Each structure stands twice: as C-alpha cells, then as structure tokens.
Amino acid sequence: MLERLMVGVGAFVVCLPLTFAAIVVGRHAGLLDMPTLIKPHARPIPYTGGAAIAVVIFATAIAADQFPLALVGVGVWLIGFVDDMRSPPPVVKLLLELLLILLWAITQPIAFPELIVAVATGVVLMNAFNVIDGLDGLAAGCALAPLVVVATAHGPAGVIAAAAAGSVAAFLVFNRPPARVFLGDEGSLVLGFLLWALPLIAGMGFTTPKGALMWTLLWLFPLLNAAFVVAGRMRAGRPIMLGDRSHLYDFWRKRSGLTMTLLACWSIAALGAVGAFIARGL
C-alpha cells in the first residue's frame, strides 16, 4: 500500500502544474465552456482540465505495461475533445464509444457472452459518469473514492488507479467552487472509461451476485443520478438523451445550495466505494 500511496502523491505533484498549464492553454487557445441556459456558470471557463489528468493516467498505463488501455483511452479523450468543441450527433458519439470499448475489451480475457454485456455496460456507465459533470467539483469528487478503492487491488489496475486518484485530487484544487477549469467531456469520459476498465483488469467481474453488488456500489452516485433522470424524463414525455437541468444534483442544489449538494453527492459516492471495498472482502 505504501507503493500505491507514493504513486498517488507523485501523480498529484505532477498533475498540479499540468492542470495550471491546461488552464493557461485553454484560455489562450479559446477552448472555453461558454455560459448557456443549461450551463449557468458566470464566465467562460477552460474545459481543458481533463487533458492534464489524461496525460498522467496514460503515462502510468504505459509504464504499467497496459498499452491497449492507454491507446483506447487516448481515443476516448479525443471523442470528448471533439464533443467539447463541436458537439457531434449523439448517435455518432455513442457508436465511436462502442467501437473503442469493444477494441479494448477484446484484448482482455473475457468470454464471448460476458464480452457483449461488458461492452454494453461500458457505454452506459461512461455516459452515466459523463452527465454528472454538471457542478463545480462534482464529477471529480465522485470519482475519487472509487479510484482509491480500486487502487487497493493488486497488479497494474491498482497502480493506474492510484495515479488517477492523485491526478484527480490535483485537478480538484482548481475545480472546487468557484471552478477555474472544467473536466470537459474529454476528462469525464476518460474517468468513466477508467472506472469501467480498471475493475475488469483487477478481476472484479460483474457476472456473479457479489460482482454485480461491487460494481453497483462503485458506481452508486452516477447510477442513482441516471435512474432519477430517466424516470423524470419518461414521466414528462421528454427525450431521454436531451440535455437539461433535471439531474438529481440539480434537484438538490435548488433546495440545499451548492455546498450541501456536493457534500451529499460525494458522501454517496464514498459510502458506495466503502461498501464495494467491504463486499470484495466477503
């Protein structure tokens, strides 16, 4: 565990200046998330923070002999980057995500029936995580505890998760309210991809009751938010894929404010991660 702690601290130290550099580059290059009706931040904010996190994570993956993970991760980052800049049709985005997830999954020792389920689950979970990036500090804060739990696993998955946790913590220094930088789709999709792929590398299967429980707990807040959104939009007769401010965290923010909402969401994610850690030892 000392090794993982050192990896996490090292990632934090490296990612801190990288995130600051990403802010400067984003501002000068005009890579800014502009305020809109569904993006109520007060001023344009660089959406380049995910690039800093990705650099640390993919470098660690290559060092840990997980080149396919790094290569597909770069592809996921590119999908998010293009989405941040041009917003391609959702169907195109989903198909590209499906292709990349399939390319990585076939490099893993996953039998054919489970492979189909794993790929479909990956697409759903990546996008469930993507849509919780709607408040300052929310998505990164909800990723931190699950990454710490995965970091306790043996092998390369634990090392990469430790580096991801350290880089996410560094990003949060600049992303806490009021945010100076956003993850962007490029960052939230990469974190979603990692939180799906790393448990598989660590041998945390989801085809048994115990495995399914662990996965549900690791993804507790994104899954709760997705269920809340889908149910609400179906009741209202709105398209499920339509972007709006009907998320669980939006509901709580209107009633309790930003700080209490973040604490509630982070707590749910942390409790789920602790539950997954306990379930793994049963």
Image (cartoon, rainbow, N blue to C red):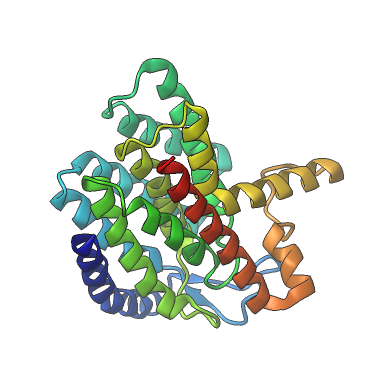
Residue furthest out toward the front: 282
Residue 159 point in image, percent of width and height: 23, 54
- Can residue 23 be spotted in the picture? yes
User: As drawn, is 13 to the left or to the right of 25?
Assistant: left
Residue 229 sits above or below residue 211 on the image: below
Residue 198 point in image, percent of width and height: 34, 44
Viewer-nearest residue: 84 or 202: 202
Count the numbered circles shown.
Answer: 0
Residue 176 point in image, percent of width and height: 50, 78
Q: Quadrant of the C terminus?
A: top left
Residue 101 sits above or below residue 198 on the image: above
Q: Quadrant of the N terminus?
A: bottom left
At x 42% / y 42%, what residue is drawn?
Answer: 280
- Can residue 54 be spotted in the picture? no
Residue 279 point in image, percent of width and height: 47, 43
Viewer-nearest residue: 185 or 107: 107
Residue furthest out toward the right: 236
Viewer-nearest residue: 224 or 122: 224
Residue 28, picture quadrant: bottom left
User: As drawn, is 29 to the left or to the right of 279?
Assistant: left
Viewer-nearest residue: 239 or 249: 249
Residue 17, picture quadrant: bottom left
At x 38% / y 66%, what residue is drawn?
Answer: 168
